[in-house]
Amino acid sequence: MSNSSDNLHFAQKIDKHAKSSLLRPNSKLEHALSNSKARGLPPIQVSPLAGQYLAIQAQLIGAKSVLEIGTLGGYSSIWFAEAGAKVTSIEIDPKHREVAMQNVEGLDVEIILGAALDVMPKLAEEGRKFDMVFIDADWDEQYEYFDWAVKLTRPRGCIYVDNVVRALLESESTEEGSESQVAKIGRDPRVVATLVPTVSSNKGVSSEMFDGFVLAVVKDH
Ligand code: SAH
Ligand code: MG
């Protein structure tokens, strides 16, 4: 029989092995983490292995442009920029944006200050299209972000929605009966999507060990 502390131990063991085997030292990323911590930002950026996943995904589709919803200190922006994409990131909090601007210095990253649901329609009006959209902001509005992301993604581009499993698990008790974001995405004829469940000890607590993201590809007709 296993219990949740055993499970956290297993997740830690896997993470430790994968991180030490697969990740390479990167002073820009390390500086972003230490500066964000020093400036008092919450440590809610993607895990290092998830960051490397995003960078690989961007390279697999040859992404030259990435739209990111939720910048925080620019940690995930750095992963995308170093994978060869021009990054447009939207952040609602002026302090987060300011710290991120320091952290991404020298990289091709534009950070727009504003609420995603104000900024995304403007980008659409300007006719902007991106190869990949990474959604990682307010969980309550995730489906609205997704809807705009589809309009802002080129055919065969992809959309990654972070923390979908945590949002599902946490909403279950509060919003009984309301249609989940996953169900809405599943009904959307413009995309084909899957859910990739993840196990990670990154947050250090067993209650946050299970998470997962939705990856969608935008159809070309
Ligand atoms: N992508 C980052 C982490 C983002 S954390 C990384 O992995 O490095 C979520 C961020 O979304 C926070 O900085 C928060 O201020 C921002 N945010 C929350 N609601 C938002 C909204 N409606 N529009 C834009 N940004 C928002
Ligand atoms: Mg996240």
Image: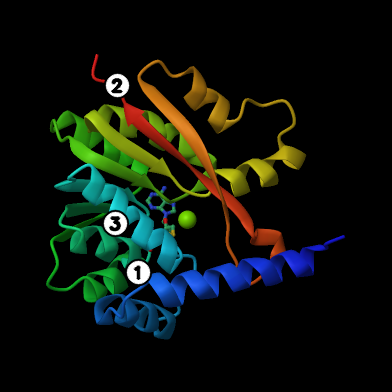
The C terminus is located in which quarter?
top left
Q: Residue at x 37, y 61 (%)?
A: 51
Position of 96 with respect to 85 (left or right) is: right
Q: Position of residue 213 (x, y in %)?
A: 49, 45
Position of 4 with respect to 95 (left or right) is: right
Position of 60 with respect to 42 (left or right) is: left
Amino acid on which disc 3 is placed: Ala
In primary-sequence order, the first of circles 3 and 2 is: 3
Pointer 1: what residue? Answer: 73
> Is the CB of mark 1 within 8 Å of ligand 1?
yes
The N terminus is located in which quarter?
bottom right
Residue 200 appears anywhere in the view: yes
Secondary element at tag 2: loop
Q: CA distance from mark 3 to mark 1?
A: 17 Å
Q: Position of residue 53 (x, y in %)?
A: 37, 56
Pointer 3: what residue? Answer: 55
Pointer 2: what residue? Answer: 219
Secondary element at tag 3: helix
Q: CA distance from mark 3 to mark 2?
A: 22 Å
Query: In the rendered image of this protein, does residue 150 appear above or below residue 171?
Result: above
In primary-sequence order, the first of circles 3 and 1 is: 3
10 Å crowding of disc 1: few (<14), some (14-19), many (20+): many
Residue 99 in which image quadrant: bottom left
Position of 104 with respect to 73 (left or right) is: left
10 Å crowding of disc 2: few (<14), some (14-19), many (20+): some
